[in-house]
Amino acid sequence: MPDFTLTAAPPLAGLHHSIDGTTLTSPEGLAIVSLALPLGAEDKAEKAIKTAFGALPDVGLSSEAKGHRLLRMGQDQAFVIFECDTPDAEPKVAGKLKGAAYTTDQTDAWCILQLSGPRARDVLERICMVNLHPDAFPVGALARTIMEHMGSVVVRTEADTYLLMSASSSAKSFAHAVELSMDNIS
């Protein structure tokens, strides 16, 4: 019987699409771990998260500290995104929180794209229903939305840079939608 070895690979590894200074890539080596704050022990969980990764931002915001990006997805839910090339992201986060929050590895469930450049907002405005004007969506803002019929998360990380997340099961369709929007604004 043949001996097979499976190796995990991001669904969009190697993606690079660039037009007129606006670039779409799929960052490699990023892990996503969800945090759920236990009912009745939210204060303890928030203190542990602050010690490990920095203060938990308000709902709808993200922050970056200590090499980790925190996304506050809901009142009792957050994501931690960080560089981790090995499949042990969840135990690393859980170890830092010492049981103060529930953790689940989400790395394989999501694909992440990074869109950056002077026309990034123009690209997203064609396919995203969120008001991305800087007055309404400042650096650090995040929103759950739909892009081209796919559930997604948009995070503004810098003035002209966005992290885009969607289900890994539709990763190629998601990337195609963003690439097509890029092609149509040029």
Image (spheres, rainbow, N blue to C red):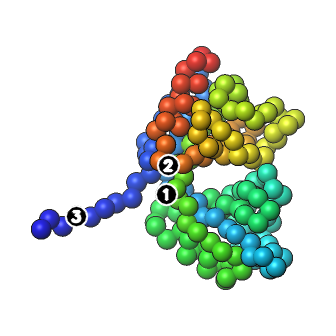
Q: Nearer the viewer, residue 123 or 1?
A: 1
Q: Label 1: few (<14), some or many (≥20) within 10 Å?
A: some
Q: Position of residue 131 (x, y in %)?
A: 79, 33
Q: Nearer the viewer, residue 154 or 14?
A: 154
For mark 2, what is the residue? 168
Q: Check the image and name the residue furthest to the right.
A: 135
The image quarter containing residue 150 is top right
Q: Position of residue 142 (x, y in %)?
A: 74, 47
Q: Position of residue 16 (x, y in %)?
A: 48, 35
Q: In which quadrant of the rendered image does the C terminus lie?
A: top right
Examine the rendered structure and indicate whether residue 8 appears above or below residue 88: above
For mark 3, what is the residue? 4
Drawn side of residue 57 relative to residue 160, left or right: right
Drawn side of residue 83 relative to residue 162, left or right: left
Q: In which quadrant of the rendered image does the N terminus lie?
A: bottom left
Marks 1 and 2: CB-CB under 8 Å? yes
Q: Nearer the viewer, residue 21 or 106?
A: 106
* Kind of residue at disc 2: Ser
Question: What distance separates the C-alpha of mark 3 from that of mark 2?
Answer: 23 Å
Helix, strand or loop under label 3: loop
The image quarter containing residue 9 is bottom left
Drawn side of residue 14 relative to residue 109, left or right: left
| Residue found 83% across the figure and 34% down from its top | 134
**Which mark is drawn over residue 178?**
none
Question: What distance separates the C-alpha of mark 1 from that of mark 3?
Answer: 20 Å
Drawn side of residue 75 relative to residue 68, left or right: right
Helix, strand or loop under label 1: helix
If you read the primary sequence from the N terminus, does the residue marked by circle 1 or circle 2 appear first?
1
If you read the primary sequence from the N terminus, does the residue marked by circle 3 or circle 2 appear first?
3
For mark 1, what is the residue? 108
If you read the primary sequence from the N terminus, does the residue marked by circle 1 or circle 3 appear first?
3
| Residue found 54% across the figure and 52% down from its top | 110
